[in-house]
């Protein structure tokens, strides 16, 4: 009989606390081939995509966003950034990085980031504002100089902000939609006992279950293996049809 351990199942997921940053960083490196620098004396992680166009920076910064993703598309109109507060659940950030590294994902695909929210009963407006059913998460789309940026905030009350996510106006809608889909999911997030310490219980449904220790230990390796399989199973790029040979004339 396998050993059993206690694991917390927390919902709504946006109140689950940050979790383990390795859920984001390890798959980027091991499954998607992102490279990293080595700065042992600095508490930060920097990962860059194989084509060097996208950079993820994780750096503890009191009072500021800890996670930052910047994409250089070669021109201002094709470049964008997103950032996330230190207490943002890593599973929500992973939804963004998983979309970025999915060979089948089309960054230019049109998508409505509020659609996943409406499907889960969130309040939405035509202007892009939205609110979770419990009122804890609020989002707004602010237009400035012809560009609309997204600001998503979780607060248990007016004086207690838990985290904020920001997407600038050039972020592909499909990337923002990947985040809102993970945000609105009703699937609880799993946390260890240590990860629940100091967690606010206001508005939170937390239940404990005994689960096999092996399933907890292999959750991250299994995730890496699943994401790595996307690269090997991705269909090859469509080849161009051969051009007809020029007709010979006399």
Image (cartoon, helix red, strand yellow):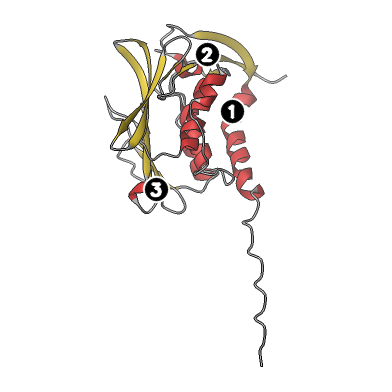
- Mark 3 or mark 2: whose residue is earlier in sequence: 2
Tell me which residue sits at (61%, 11%) in the image: 209
Q: Kindly report which numbered mark, 1 or 2, lies closer to the viewer in this rendering.
A: 2
In this rendering, the label closer to the viewer, 3 or 1: 3
Residue that label 2 marks: 11
Horizontal and vertical percent position of residue 58? 37, 36
Disc 3 to disc 2, how far (Cα)? 36 Å
In this view, the residue farthest toward the front is: 250
Quadrant of residue 138 in the image?
A: top left
First along the sequence among labels 1 and 2: 2
CA distance for labels 3 and 1: 40 Å
35 vs 56, nearest the viewer: 56
The answer to which of 184 and 116 lies nearer the viewer is 116
The residue carrying mark 3 is 78
Q: CA distance from mark 1 to mark 2?
A: 22 Å
Residue 119 is marked as none
Q: Is residue 123 above or below residue 58?
A: above
Badge 2 marks a residue whose secondary structure is strand
Residue 185 seen anywhere in this rendered image of the structure: no
Where residue 166 sits in the image (x, y, percent)?
36, 30
Pick out the residue farthest to the right: 1
Mark in the foreground, 3 or 2: 3
Mark 1, residue position: 217
Marked residue nearer the N-terminal end (3 or 1)? 3
Percent from the top left, x then y, of residue 109?
Answer: 52, 41
């Amino acid at each position: 009989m396998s050993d059993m351990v206690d694991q917390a199942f927390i919902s709504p997921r946006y109140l689950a606390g940050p979790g383990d940053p390795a859920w984001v960083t390890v798959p980027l490196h091991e499954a998607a081939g992102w490279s990293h620098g080595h700065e042992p004396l600095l508490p930060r992680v920097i990962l860059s995509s194989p084509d060097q166009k996208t950079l993820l920076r994780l750096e503890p910064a009191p009072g500021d966003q800890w996670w930052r993703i910047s994409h250089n598309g070669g021109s201002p109109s094709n470049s964008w950034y997103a950032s996330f507060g230190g207490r943002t659940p890593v599973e929500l950030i992973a939804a963004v990085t998983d979309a970025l590294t999915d060979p089948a994902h089309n960054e230019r695909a049109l998508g409505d980031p509020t659609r996943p929210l409406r499907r889960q009963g969130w309040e939405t407006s035509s202007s892009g504002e939205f609110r979770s059913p419990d009122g804890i998460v609020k989002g707004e789309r602010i237009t400035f100089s012809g560009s609309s940026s997204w600001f998503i905030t979780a607060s248990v009350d007016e004086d207690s902000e838990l985290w904020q996510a920001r997407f600038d106006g050039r972020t592909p809608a499909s990337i923002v939609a990947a985040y809102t889909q993970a945000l609105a999911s009703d699937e609880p997030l799993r946390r260890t006992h240590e990860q629940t310490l100091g967690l606010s219980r206001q508005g939170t449904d937390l239940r404990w279950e005994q689960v096999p220790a092996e399933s907890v230990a292999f959750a991250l390796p299994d995730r890496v293996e699943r994401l790595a399989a996307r690269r090997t199973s991705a269909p090859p790029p469509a080849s161009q049809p051969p051009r007809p040979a020029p007709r010979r004339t006399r």
